Image (tube, grey):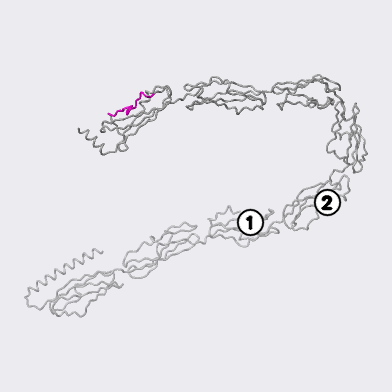
Amino acid sequence: MRFIFLIITLFATNNLNVTWENTVIDIMLGESPEPYFELPSAHLFMDDEEVFDPLMYYERGVEFTSLLDVNTNRIREYNIRYRVVYPSFDYLRNTITVKFRILDRTPPTFILVPSFTIPLDGKVTNYFAGVDVIDNYYKFEELTLHVDATRVNNKVVGTYKIIYVATDPSGNVSSCESFVNVIDDIPPSITLKKELIGEVNEIIDLRNYFTIKDNYNTVVTILILDDYIDYANIGIYPFTVIARDQSLNETILDDYFLLVDTTKPIIELKPNPKTIRVFTTIDSDFLLSYILYVSDNYNLLTINDCLTFHNIDSSYIGDYQVTFLLRDSSLNEAIKTLKVSVVDDIAPSISIKTDLIFDVFDVEPFLINYFEVVDNYYDPSDIAIKIDCKFNINVVGTYQLSFTATDKSKNTASLNTYLYVVDNISPIITQVHDIVISDFTRKNLSGYFTYSDNYTPVNNLIFTAYDMNIDYKEVGSYEIVVSVKDSSSNTTIILVEILIVDIIPPSLELSSESIVVMINSEEINYLSYIISVSDNVTYLTTENVLIKPEVNYFQIGKYQVLYEVYDEFMGYNSKILIVYVDDLFAPRVYAHDIIKKFNTEFDIFEGISYEDETSCNIDYFPKNINFLSPGTKKVFYAVTDLRGNTTIVSRNIEIEPFSKTPILSEYYFSIGSLILAAISSLYLYFKKEKYD
């Protein structure tokens, strides 16, 4: 009862929800339905979290529906009501409709499809004649047939694929391929288009004598049976022509062919015939050298079979004509004429008489005098000379020079060379200052010299001091080489002396410029105030410092301590330390209260003592105290040392009233005074010991 109450409470206080899976189920035609009845399933959720009831069960086929109604041999849909019950949750129930769909997924089957053969431009009258298709469920009349013959081109020979498609009412589709053959059965035609006459020894293609056409093929196979024709000899020869199209339709023609020789011989002259150099000897062999080759289609001819005619005089430059004649055995004749020229094609020769080297600032030369020109045909006066050289005699450099000589036949000779403007004078160098180095650093030594050149500007001269052997950190005398080089590498060299000297004083640094010491103190350690002592050359320590103190520690005042240091080259440096001897502390004063009898004399400074490094002056105030009247008087004492440091203390002086008490009271007073004096003495003693 407690468990049931808990479930009821949970059910009442929480949100329960039932969801179903597999509520639409497909079953293939003719398949057993029982395995599919178990597929629908329910899931219980409490507040979006799935819970399980071990007592849960299903009721299949409720509300006037039954699983027996499901027949898989018919294509249709069945709606069966399913219920789930959760006893643990107060017998919660949920009912839904499960749909069972009987489906056909088997396509039709082609039993027979025809193939077709048609001529060019022919057509298939009925593609469906002879087609046989069956289906697993539907009748033939319920099937839909379609044929795709779009690939068939009845104007082009070939085999074309056609596709049959069968579809049943359930949408299952199957296809099958077949073929349409388009054929050509008409042979080609052969027509003669010119006389069957050809030139002997020529390449003859008998196909050029006929027009061959076909009703379909643009390319026809042509066979020429000309084994009996001797193309190298004149005569009449039989031959056969066979024309066959790509469908093997064939036409045959038999006829005769006539070979004749009507071709002139060929004289081929060399292209761009060479000119004839003046003074050349002209003979038959020379003229025949202009022929590249000769040929004939029938006879074997050579260059020597040619006849030559000319009017050439090689002693004079000019244009002449040469005629060449060649004839074969059939009296076919070839004539060629050639225009030739007698020319001067040798350029003048150029030579240099002397080197083209000139000093800068010299007189500009007349360059033509430095060359010699000779020609094989023309006089020197007929030679045109051109010199191209842009040079400046005042500027050192290498200049390109082009010398050109041209004769009247336009033969040109060129000579490219160089003209040199040179500077052979070395620079001038003068030492204007002694070289003394005092800071032990390497210097630019060019400032100790003046130098100049006849051509190169001073800024472009190269000054070099070869001081690699100098130790600039070591005092001494050194000899070095100094050179000045101009832009033409002319160099002047001199030897000079360098002195390395030490003029830098030592360095001395104190930790302070002044200090204060107390009077009567012990002498200070003067070395401790030296921070550093050094020199650029000499090794120095504090032991090398001379100290001259003039300090009186027993007298207040301002004093000097002189620090002096010397390096090995007598470089000197000094520092002064100011020492102030002073008293900075006020005196220590001791004052004790005292009691005096009425109308007795006493010392106002009685019982006053002090401690100080110097003597002190003591004063008191106020001055107007009446010590003749009884009572306690407060007195202030000022103790001032020689430095002006002052300490002020006060004490009470008690004046007893007049009394006739026997001597006993005086006795007691005397005893007390002695005790007080003893205590004061002990205090002063221990005080002094403490400060000492």
Tag 2 residue = 385
Residue 192 is situated, as x and y percent measured from the top left of the image, at 80, 25
- Height in image: 322 above or below 653? above
Q: Image quarter for residue 432?
A: bottom right
Residue 163 drawn in magenta: no
- Three-letter code for the amino acid on which mark 2 is drawn: Ile
Name the one closer to the observer, 210 or 426.
210
Residue 61 drawn in magenta: yes
Placement of the N terminus among the 4 image quadrants: top left
Q: Which mark is residue 321?
A: none
Range of magenta residues: 55-70
Sort mark 2 into few (<14), some (14-19) or many (20+) by Cα contacts within 10 Å.
some
Residue 355 is situated, as x and y percent measured from the top left of the image, at 78, 50
Residue 596 is situated, as x and y percent measured from the top left of the image, at 14, 75
Q: Is residue 306 left or right of residue 554?
A: right
Q: How many marks?
A: 2
Q: Residue furthest front?
A: 141
Name the one closer to the observer, 544 or 393.
393
Q: Earlier in the sequence, mark 1 or mark 2?
A: 2
- Three-letter code for the amino acid on which mark 1 is drawn: Phe
- Height in image: 132 above or below 413? above
Label 2: state its secondary structure: strand
Placement of the C terminus among the 4 image quadrants: bottom left
* Residue occupying image coordinates x 48% and y 58%: 535
Q: Image quarter for residue 615?
A: bottom left
Tag 1 residue = 463
Residue 412 is situated, as x and y percent measured from the top left of the image, at 82, 46
Q: Image quarter for residue 341?
A: top right
Q: Are marks 1 and 2 in contact (CB under 8 Å)?
A: no
Name the one closer to the observer, 109 or 341.
109
Disc nearest the viewer among 1 and 2:
2
